[in-house]
Amino acid sequence: MDMAQVIDGSREAVRMALLLGGPLLAAALAVALVVGVVQTLTQMHDPVVGLVPRLAAVLLALLAVLPWAIESWVAYAADLIGSIPERF
């Protein structure tokens, strides 16, 4: 296994992690920005007020992208397992 294969495998793993985690992080960021603005306008700075909507948004985003995420993850794992004989 040469260095180019290691770099390509690492790059693909990071790309897959960003693809799977990106929608959830984007949902949490969007809700956090909205809640932050609302908390600033109402001057109510309780940490729980920001936590509950973010958790709900991440859960809803997870439920929305779960079929796609599982399909992508299984395809990536199948490609990775299928390439083991080629790499060694």
Image (cartoon, rainbow, N blue to C red):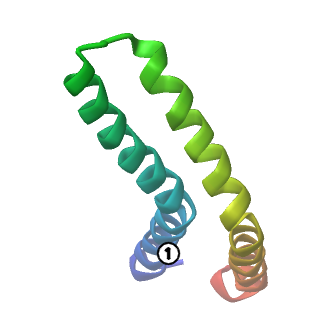
Q: Residue at x 26, y 20 (%)?
A: 42
Local packing at callout 1 (Cα closer than 10 Å; few below 14, some 14-19, many 20+) is some
Task: Name, please, the residue furthest toward the front.
Answer: 42
Q: Is residue 80 above or below residue 58?
A: below
Q: How many marks?
A: 1
Find residue 39 and report its image quarter. top left
Q: Is residue 74 above or below residue 83?
A: above
Task: Report the front residue among 49 and 83.
Answer: 49
Q: Which quadrant of the rendered structure holds the N terminus?
A: bottom right
Q: Is residue 80 above or below residue 38?
A: below
Task: Report the front residue among 25 and 81.
Answer: 25
Task: Report the front residue among 53 and 25.
Answer: 53
At numbered mark 1, what does the secondary structure look like: helix, strand or loop? helix
| Image spot of residue 87 (x, y percent) | 64, 82
Q: Residue at x 43, y 25 (%)?
A: 50
Task: Name, please, the residue furthest toward the bottom.
Answer: 86
Task: Report the front residue among 2 and 80.
Answer: 80
Judged left or right of residue 76, residue 50 is: left
Question: Callout 1, which amino acid?
Answer: Glu
Q: Is residue 49 above or below residue 32?
A: above
| Image spot of residue 56 (x, y percent) | 61, 38
Q: Residue at x 78, y 80 (%)?
A: 78
| Image spot of residue 27 (x, y percent) | 47, 52
Q: Which quadrant of the rendered structure holds the C terminus?
A: bottom right
Judged left or right of residue 20, residue 35 is: left
Residue linked to disc 1: 12
